[in-house]
Image (cartoon, rainbow, N blue to C red):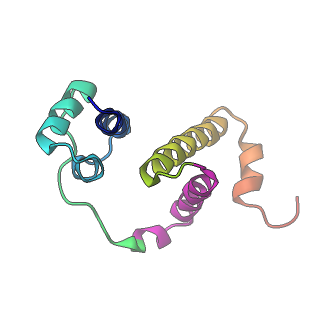
């Protein structure tokens, strides 16, 4: 087995663990959707999400929270140093997910006053 094939399977497993769409994984890795669906079911104990992707970019402007989250993801994407696009996306998403979970954990733990300055910052305390 060549290193290229092993790398394709490793990327597929990583994307499956992030619950990416089967058609995106298939396009990026060149692996069969049938194999990827079976692997998804084995990994998550449920069937993969169905339906087409939503290509409309207007969803981002409907709420300030979505715009902020998209900006955070783009920031993490830009600071990644990998040459491969898919690896940059995976690493940026992992950082983004960890950041979002940390922010929500802080908000839920009763330390809301720290986050309130970030969300509602008006230039004065």
Residue 2 lies in what quarter of the image? top left
Residue 113 lies in what quarter of the image? top right
Q: Tell whether position 96 is magenta.
A: no
Q: Is residue 66 above or below residue 12?
A: below
Q: Residue furthest left?
A: 34
Percent across and percent down for residue 62 are 46, 71
Q: Tell whether position 75 is magenta.
A: yes
- Front-most of residues 40 and 120: 40
- Front-most of residues 30 and 17: 30
Quarter occupied by the N terminus:
top left
Tally of numbered tags: 0
Percent across and percent down for residue 117 are 77, 54
Q: Residue at x 38, y 39 (%)?
A: 18
Q: Is residue 29 above or below residue 106?
A: below
Q: Residue at x 54, y 65 (%)?
A: 67
Percent across and percent down for residue 92 are 53, 48
- Front-most of residues 86 and 123: 86
45 to the left or right of 116: left
Q: Residue at x 64, y 53 (%)?
A: 79
39 to the left or right of 8: left
Quarter occupied by the C terminus:
bottom right
Percent across and percent down for residue 7 are 36, 36
Q: Which residues are magenta?
A: 59-81
């Amino acid at each position: 087995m060549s290193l290229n094939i092993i790398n394709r399977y490793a990327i597929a497993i990583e994307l499956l663990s992030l619950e990416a769409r089967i058609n995106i994984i298939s396009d990026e890795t060149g692996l069969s959707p049938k194999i990827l669906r079976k692997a998804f079911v084995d990994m998550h104990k449920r069937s993969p999400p169905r339906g087409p992707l939503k290509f409309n970019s207007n969803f981002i402007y409907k709420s300030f929270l979505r715009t902020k989250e998209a900006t955070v993801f783009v920031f993490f994407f830009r600071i990644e140093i990998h040459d491969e696009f898919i690896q940059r996306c995976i690493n940026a998403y992992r950082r983004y997910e960890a950041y979002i979970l940390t922010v929500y954990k802080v908000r839920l733990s009763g330390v809301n006053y720290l986050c309130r300055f970030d969300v509602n910052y008006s230039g004065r305390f």
